[in-house]
Image (spheres, helix red, strand yellow):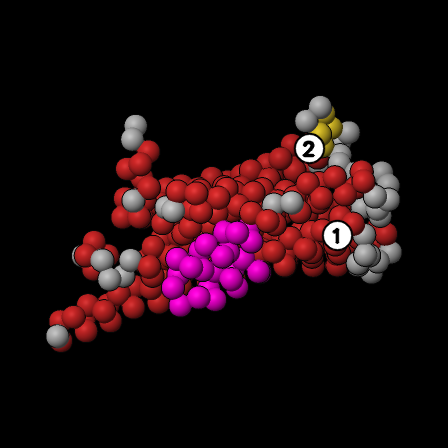
Amino acid sequence: MTHEFYLWMSYGVFAVALAIEMAGLAIRRRSALKAIEEERDLEAQD
Amino acid sequence: MNWFYFSSPSTFYRLAGALAPWFFAVAAILGAVGLYMGLLVAPTDAQQGEVYRVIFIHVPAAWMSMFLYFVMACYAGVSLTFNTRLAAMMARAVAPTGAMFTFLALWTGAFWGRPTWGTYWAWDARMVSELVLLFLYFGFMALANAFEDSRRGDRAASLLALVGLVNLPIIYFSVQWWNTLHQGSSVKFTGSSMHVTMLQSMLLMTFACWMYAIGATLVRVRCVILERERRTRWVRQL
């Protein structure tokens, strides 16, 4: 295999890992805000 | 400056929100310059050819994996000693990014090892101790989330983080203590045996990864604060 394969597999996975982490952080923040919204609604109903 | 002011989750939440975009911006600039220098400016290695360019992400990832573990263990120690909420939250926030860099160090190392050593993996002291570091990160995260009461999870995970600190000198000195396939350090506090452009590119990428890790940790700690403090008045007023 040529050196391009090893470089792409290294740099490509590096970029994918960063993208997954950023997406995971965005999803986690959205779900945390949603949970707060639900708490607020429950409180308003009480 | 009163540093205790920032140890309150509500204050730190706002500070982290203001700082995180700046760290990401600096990381992007340093990363772009580092990649340009590493992939286009740095000369081809006389022995390894072009494949040595994996170094520009492998070494920063490996350094960050150890550095972030040390930072996580420091927060864990502060959390255990002073029973501070924010320190425990910070330790939790550092762990996933540290685990990601550890995985990347192992992964990129494998794709560097295949063309240079002829194998993706060897049961070599440096590689095995780095793999143990990945398991320590996984153990920390699993233990932190294993309890209904998050404070108990914090204490158990903090203890594991402190015990796991012993692995850091083992990783660092493994290439000196044992006969390993992995090469010794090219960069030392006393100097470097690398070409200056290679060294500059590697350091730029290291600082980029460092800035990224701080940004990601700040964003994650904001999530942890929201999850933990969602019943407090200040969070509901957000």
Looking at the picture, do discs 2 and 1 lie on one chain?
yes
Q: Is residue B205 left or right of residue B234?
A: right
- Residue A22 horizontal/vertical position (percent): 47, 57
In the picture of the structure, the residue carrying the numbered disc 1 is B127
- Residue B133 horizontal/vertical position (percent): 64, 53
- Residue A6 horizontal/vertical position (percent): 75, 56
**Res. B115 visible in picture:** yes
The chain under label 1 reads B
Crowding near the residue tagged with mark 2, few <14, some 14–19, many ≥20 C-alpha atoms within 10 Å:
some
Q: Residue at x 42, y 50 (%)?
A: B88
Kind of residue at disc 2:
Leu
Q: Is residue B88 left or right of residue B187?
A: left
Q: Is residue B103 left or right of residue A43?
A: right
**Res. B48 visible in picture:** no
Between A44 and B162, the one nearer to me in the picture = B162
The chain under label 2 reads B
Q: Is residue B16 above or below residue B189?
A: below
Span shown in magenta: B138-161
Crowding near the residue tagged with mark 1, few <14, some 14–19, many ≥20 C-alpha atoms within 10 Å:
many
Instruction: State yes or no: discs 2 and 1 in contact (Cβ < 8 Å).
Output: no
SS for dot 2: helix
Within the image, what quadrant is residue B234 found in? bottom left
In the picture of the structure, the residue carrying the numbered disc 2 is B199
**Magenta residue check for B149:** yes
| Nearest to N terminus: mark 2 or mark 1 | 1
Kind of residue at disc 1:
Met
Q: Is residue B22 left or right of residue B9?
A: right
Q: Residue at x 56, y 53 (%)?
A: B160
